[in-house]
């Protein structure tokens, strides 16, 4: 038995076995742990970090993420931070204000620094009944007959195992545990390279999040990708920049200088003051570009399963959603049900989105199409809805039907459809 793991909800010794073991306490893992515990299961939620911990992110909560936070009972908590009404898109001499489309999703968004959001989500999971284990890195899995029987952790030079009946792998982009179980990230499909920092700003309470679609490097050349300024309240904004890449067309920009350049370009318009703090960057698998997402009693969720929108790089919502979905199918043969469920929910949208994002990595596409799109409110409203994947199964309007049709066609053309 290991040393007691402390959290602000309970003090408990590390369990030796559990029904559901969730590895990774980001949005995906904490959502899975909360829902599994609420369903009456014994749950252990383990993470390599000690919370609160930072995570490289734009901190933006789209309406899709808000819907999940509402389901978890966290609406008031989110509203106590900051509320935004849509996206202000800038570029090619235009500025367009595009309200969140609403429909079957909430018509508002928010942004909460991940240090705080993830700590609160983890606390929510622990309050729901999950047992937290911190500072414990999963390093190996004991697999017998294809089933995971236990996960080996390392903490403070000590190694120990937690046995489990079911395993949810939510260990993020690199997914070390996923790799042990055979997960493969396909970098020939478009992925993102992105960075963020925090800056004091006079626009910290702006009710719009801002994106700059005309992103330029230090030499003034347009880069495929976008810059963002997400107001966080409390006098600060999250500023970041992301660009797209594939193995064939690797990103040929250094992300931190690109971000620093973006901060300087926007300093006057956004009342940015002082130094950019905590600049970090990361790679981001997107659009289900991984295979090996499940075995008989284990499943990958969130970033580990590349559940990130290829057109805007957001994945908190998909992390929260997959955390909820996986709990409903835990008692099935996950090697069959989980890839099928991911494909059903995200296959078509991810397929068409990553196809379009792949096209955007070609030189001259953004400079050619950007100015045309930005001339039309109508085109950009539609683009926002599609790029944000604000189309749910309940939506029956023409834009939703076109998006679904394009998705179906795209999957038909895929040499390797999402999650395969
Ligand atoms: C620059 C950037 C900007 C972004 N901006 C946005 C945005 O504005 N909005 C949005 O919705 N999404 C955004 N994203 C994507 C978003 O950050 C991810 O999709 C989201 O964090 C996925 O959550 P997750 O729970 O799957 O993984 P994570 O949040 O990465 O959590 C994984 C957890 O697993 C733990 N872990 C890792 N390895 C181990 C191990 N071996 N053992 C135990 N624990 C382990 C980690 O400590 C971590 O706590 C951005 C990403 C980047 C890189």
Image (cartoon, grey):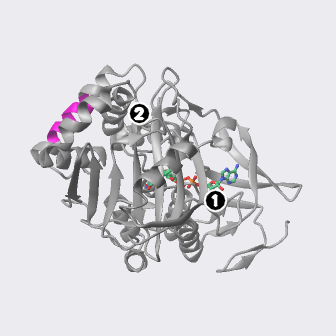
Instruction: Give the SS element for disc 2.
Output: loop
Q: Would you name the residue on which mark 1 appears?
A: 19
Q: Nearer the viewer, mark 2 or mark 1?
A: 2
Q: Is residue 73 above or below residue 370?
A: below
Which residue is drawn at the image coordinates 47% and 28% (left, top)?
Answer: 420
Upstream in the sequence, badge 2 or badge 1? 1
Distance CA(mark 2)–CA(mark 1): 54 Å
Viewer-closest of 211 and 158: 211
Give the magenta-colored segment's residue range.
Answer: 401-408
Label 2 CB less than 8 angstroms from ligand 1: no
For residue 257, the mark is none
Tell me, yes or no, if residue 302 can be seen here. no
Can you give x and y, in whole percent of width and height, for residue 351 in the image? 35, 32
Callout 1: SS: strand
Measured from the top left, where is residue 249 in percent x and y? Answer: 48, 23
Q: Main secondary structure of the magenta part?
A: helix
Q: Is mark 1 within 8 Å of ligand 1?
A: no
Q: Which residue in the protein does label 2 denote? A: 221
Say which quarter of the image contains residue 417.
top left
Count the numbered circles shown: 2
Residue at far right of view? 157
- In the displayed structure image, the side of residue 394 where residue 145 appears, left or right: right
- The answer to which of 211 and 417 lies nearer the viewer is 211
- Describe residue 360's horizontal placement relative to residue 162 as left or right: left
Instruction: Describe residue 103's horizontal placement relative to residue 165 as left or right.
Output: left
Measured as percent of width and height from the top left, residue 287 is found at 42, 37
Location of the N terminus by quadrant is: bottom right
Horizontal side, residue 146 vs residue 268: left or right: right
Per the image, is 402 magenta? Answer: yes
Badge 1 density bin: few <14, some 14–19, many ≥20, Cα 10 Å = some
Residue 163 location in percent, x, y? 73, 54
């Amino acid at each position: 038995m290991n040393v007691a793991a402390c959290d602000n909800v309970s003090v408990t010794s590390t369990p030796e076995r559990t029904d559901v073991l969730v590895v990774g306490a980001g949005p995906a893992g904490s959502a899975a742990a909360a829902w599994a515990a609420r369903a009456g299961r014994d749950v252990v939620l383990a993470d390599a970090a000690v919370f609160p911990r930072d995570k490289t992110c734009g901190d933006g909560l789209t309406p899709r993420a808000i819907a999940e936070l509402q389901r978890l009972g966290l609406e008031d908590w989110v509203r106590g931070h900051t509320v935004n009404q849509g996206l202000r898109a800038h570029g090619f001499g235009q500025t367009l204000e595009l309200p969140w489309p609403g429909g079957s999703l909430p018509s508002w968004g928010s942004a909460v620094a991940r240090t705080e959001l993830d700590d609160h989500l983890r606390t929510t999971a622990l309050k729901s009944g999950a047992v937290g284990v911190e500072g414990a890195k999963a390093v190996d899995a004991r697999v017998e007959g294809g089933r995971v029987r236990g996960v080996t952790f390392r903490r403070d030079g000590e190694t120990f195992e937690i046995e489990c009946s079911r395993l949810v792998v939510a260990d993020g982009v690199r997914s070390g545990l996923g790799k042990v179980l055979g997960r493969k990230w396909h970098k020939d499909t478009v992925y993102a390279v992105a960075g963020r920092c925090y800056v004091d700003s006079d626009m910290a309470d702006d009710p719009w999040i801002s994106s700059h679609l005309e992103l330029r490097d230090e030499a003034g050349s347009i880069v495929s990708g976008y810059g963002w300024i997400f107001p966080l309240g409390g006098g600060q904004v999250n500023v970041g920049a992301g660009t797209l890449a594939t193995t064939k067309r690797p990103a040929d920009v250094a992300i931190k200088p690109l971000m620093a350049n973006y901060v300087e370009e926007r300093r006057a318009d956004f009342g940015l003051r002082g130094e950019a703090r905590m600049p970090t960057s990361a790679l981001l698998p997107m659009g289900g570009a991984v295979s090996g997402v499940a075995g008989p009693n284990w499943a990958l969720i969130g970033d580990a399963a590349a559940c990130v929108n290829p057109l805007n790089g957001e994945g908190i919502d998909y992390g929260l959603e997959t955390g909820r979905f996986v709990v409903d199918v835990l008692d099935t043969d996950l090697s069959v049900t989980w890839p099928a469920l991911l494909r059903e929910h995200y296959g078509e949208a991810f397929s068409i989105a990553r196809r379009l994002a792949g096209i955007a990595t070609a030189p001259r596409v953004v400079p050619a199409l950007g100015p045309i799109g930005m001339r039309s409110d109508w085109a950009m409203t539609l683009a926002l809805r599609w790029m944000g994947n604000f189309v749910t199964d309940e939506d029956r309007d023409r834009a939703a039907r076109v998006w679904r049709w394009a998705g179906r066609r795209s999957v038909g053309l895929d040499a390797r459809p999402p999650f395969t």
